[in-house]
Image (cartoon, rainbow, N blue to C red):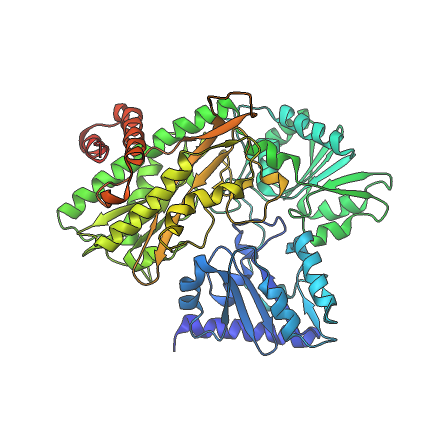
Amino acid sequence: MDTRTSVHRLRIERLREVLIREGVDALLVPSSDPHLSEYLPERWQARQWFSGFTGSMGTLVVTTTQAAVFADSRYWVQAEAELAGTGITLVKIPTGTAALHLDWLAREVPRGGAVAVDGQVLGVAAAAALKDALDAVGVQLHTDSDLVDQAWPERAGLPANPVYEHRAPHAVQSRAAKLAQVREAMQRHGVTQHFVSTVDDIAWITNLRGADVHYNPVFLAHLLLGAEDATLFVEDRKIDAALAATLAVDGLRLAPYAQAGAALAALPAESRLLIDPRRVTFGLRQCVAPGVSVVEAVNPSTLLKSRKTEAEAAFVREAMVEDGVAMCHFYAGLEAAMGRGEPISEMTIDEWLSAERAKRPGFVGLSFPVIAGFNANGAMPHYRATPASFAQIEGDGLLLIDSGGQYLGGTTDITRVWPIGMPSAAMRRDYTLVLKGTLALSRTRFPRGTPGPMLDAIARAPLWAEGVEFGHGTGHGVGYFLAVHEGPQSISKAVVVPSMAMEPGMITSIEPGLYRDGQWGVRIENLVLNVPASTPEAGAFGEFLEFETLTLCPIDTRCIERSLLRSDEIDWLNGYHATVRQRLATQLQGDALAWLKTRTEPF
């Protein structure tokens, strides 16, 4: 018997026993924590622990007779493999924001029944949508208990990693200056207090960093800001006495992590509280005293931290040089090893590439797990090789490598695809179509304030013209030594909202792709910075922006089908490679320098 499969069946059965004992018909287990984070501390990885599905996004629903995982197209192949034999059904949803689990619950739970979910890990907006869907079919919603805890005896406690300061020169804005900016926004909203739960917002506001979440230099905390004072709710002993004294100078006092809810309940009745309904949990929202006026709006820090200053952009450019140097050393070594016929696997690539980044000045850690997928594995956008399941790099095909690093001066994220042996004509065609999408968006100018989703079709157009498509977004915001996925901007098919406006200083990925299940995948990704554009009609039609490509690594030209590229596209590619060579060559020597020169030859 498959031990992995049987253990997940047993865990689901344990959950069902809890449901029956508590008198509820279904349990909703989101991929979430009390901070609504994308990457979760071990304590809140319940969906993965019970189901075995390891994707970073997805929702588990368990009833007394059924169980289902809801996941979007990035994870379908992976989820089908990981859920096989568990008795858990995969429900395929069109996007990561789709809410098919609401329809499923409304259909499967009988009228008069009850659905449970831990309100401490459910967003305010998500709770409202869930309640509306269940009310419509006469089903009750219970949010006041954590049933997962009763069925997970091995559950981890809170992480205890220390918190540290992000210091100058890389922390180019002082904590006092950031607090002042947020308080200015509070005044515009007419509020007396502002409650923040999102860990990257808190890290940015306080100039603090931690290691409570893999790949993200953040720590678990809540923050309550007043006009003159502020309270940081954080686990005891995570901040030492010296740092606590430094924070006190800026008016930041410390309180136990578990007291955040009580502090909201104790707010004076005349208070006006600002919260972001998509970034605060329902459980904490319920703690707010009834007499307090609540103003719902996007966290001011979300926009503030997305707009990197000139000094921050300069440090990001330095981090890109370090990242590019690491990539050159890695790829030079990889190609040399393959030329000698050494056995190389996807696991080898993860190990070697991570080791090269670790040698670079200012490197703190990876920004996400290395994705190294050869041929069919590359067709899974969020694939990760494991010691139990990986491919050898041998024969003919395409090798997709998506990776990134956390540096004191910035966060990187890059995807490249490399030919192994002799790629087929179909592979080269797919590669070139994706490249055309990357080039099309990279060269775009647009009015300041254009919503990110309005740019999405530009990258997709070359693929759409050939009748092909990809299921993930084209681009996500990237933090400054923070989360590799950051809002508010998004280049995707998402519904347009005002907060998605593209503003100067934002860093975003451009990463169209094309995936053929069971065959191969292509994705070419660079990070870009929004910068002012000089236009012939400067000023007459408002301010325009364009993209400065930040990522410094050759784009392989051996996979290109030349007949599909226009001369202006080739000119851009050659210009980019000239920049890559100029920026990196002085930092390299020997085999790595020779590799760089070869891979940046004009096409």
Could you say where residue 135 lies in the image, as x and y percent from the top left?
Answer: 74, 66
Query: Where is residue 165, by image quadrant?
Result: top right
Query: Where is residue 240, by image quadrant?
Result: top right
User: Compared to 527, does 379 lie above or below?
Assistant: below
User: Compared to 4, does 460 lie above or below?
Assistant: above
Specify whether residue 407 is in view: no
Quarter containing the C terminus:
top left
Number of numbered discs on residues: 0
Specify whether residue 539 is in view: yes
| Residue at x 79%, y 34% (from the top left corner) | 192
Q: Nearer the viewer, residue 125 or 62?
A: 125
Could you say where residue 281 lies in the image, as x and y percent from the top left?
Answer: 67, 51
Q: Is residue 16 left or right of residue 216?
A: right
| Residue at x 82%, y 43% (from the top left corner) | 293
Quarter containing the N terminus:
bottom left
| Residue at x 46%, y 73% (from the top left corner) | 86
Could you say where residue 105 lies in the image, as x and y percent from the top left?
Answer: 63, 70
User: Compared to 330, does 138 lie above or below?
Assistant: below
Q: Is residue 165 left or right of residue 465?
A: right
Q: Nearer the viewer, residue 477 or 474?
A: 474
Could you say where residue 138 lies in the image, as x and y percent from the top left?
Answer: 75, 72
Q: Nearer the viewer, residue 539 or 122?
A: 539
User: Compared to 197, does 9 lie above or below?
Assistant: below
